Amino acid sequence: MWACRPSQRPPARAAPRVLRWRHVAEPGARDGSGIALALNRDVIRPLRIVASAALDCVYLLRSRHRPLTKLRILVEYWRLTLKLIVVTPFLSLRKDRVLGFHVEAFDYESLHFLFSEIFVRSQYWVDCPNDRPLIFDCGANIGLATIFFKWRYPHSSIHCFEPDRRTFELLTRNVEANRLPDVHLHNVALSNAVGTVELFVAARRAGSLLMSMDPLRIPEPDVQKTVVDSTKLSLLVNGRKVDLVKMDVEGAERLVVADLVESGSIGMVNELVVEYHHDVDRRRANLGEFLCLLEGAGFKYQLDVAWAAGRDEFQDVLLHAYRPKSPTSTVRGTLT
């Protein structure tokens, strides 16, 4: 989920903001209106979380998981949801055991959000052609998508790319804590050139899912610039057959895919699941050009588009690109 990514996915559905219980008046309040506002927020917040979780469950029911697996995910999701509502206003939580995996996050809010996107909504679901797929997790964030892939395909080989140093450290701890085999970690940004790139992160929120190579992605007072190493994904493909490229690189997706096309490496990729950030810089729309790159490389695709509040507003587009069907059968993966 990075930013050079040049996984919230957000803007499609921004993670709920954790509001702390306050028994003191808001600054400037003279008649207790500040207390009323704080209490009102504490009433509204749980309702919003529950409403969002209920909508997520509709996606889960429509997913391709087996019935018992759906039930398992459902129980786990509501446990996380209740914990978010009841516990986090009073305690700061960063760790939990999720579906048997030890997961550490920067905060419980982001852990809950990532679980809903990846496990409940099944955004990265693919049926690989074998039980040992090669997967590139571009914008791995803390590694929850990697855990999802290992959950479905235990014998898969996964390369994870995460440019932010602090997020990469957390990704490493999660991979090591779960002893995930054949997972290779790369602390680099992906772009269309080898060298360094500017990565913009939130200064007051470590591991923000909005980090990006575009400074406009983060509110100006909180933006902080860092310089990170960058490389081209085509160099990592290196003539190997790649079953899946999952890409959440916060605005760099067009650069990465253009490099794959220009180098010819796109021909080695079977499927892509891309979180395309439409109008992320509000300058010039490039979605059409991006789709033309995929069409020219022989892909078909389906889109899941988030609703936008108005014209020229940022939109998250979840794009699943795949090769036309062939007689080769697919393997659905191991569901536990």
Image: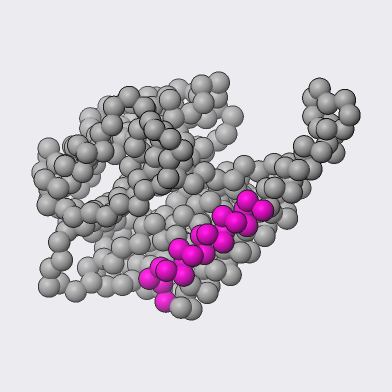
User: Where is residue 49 drawn, in percent x and y?
Assistant: 62, 53
Q: Is residue 130 above or below residue 217?
A: below
User: Where is residue 35 drawn, in percent x and y?
Assistant: 83, 36
Q: How is the image coloured?
A: one colour
Q: Is residue 303 above or below residue 232?
A: below
User: Where is residue 286 drawn, in percent x and y?
Assistant: 25, 33
Q: Is residue 145 above or below residue 186?
A: below
Residue depicted at 51% across the width and 37% down the height: 208
Residue depicted at 21% across the width and 57% down the height: 322
- Residue 119 falls left or right of residue 189: right
In reply to whether residue 91 is colored magenta, the answer given is no
User: Where is residue 125 drawn, in percent x and y?
Assistant: 35, 62
Query: Residue 188 lies in what quarter of the image?
Result: top left
Query: Residue 18 lies in what quarter of the image?
Result: top right
In reply to whether residue 65 is colored magenta, the answer given is yes
Residue depicted at 53% across the width and 51% down the height: 113
Question: What's the magenta region?
Answer: 47-66
Residue 3 visible in the snapshot: no
Residue depicted at 46% across the width and 70% down the height: 61
- Residue 88 falls left or right of residue 135: right
Main secondary structure along the magenta-highlighted residues:
helix
Quarter of the figure with the N terminus: top left
**Camera-side residue of 224 and 70:** 70
Quarter of the figure with the C terminus: bottom left
- The residue at the far right in this view is 31
- The residue at the far bottom in this view is 68
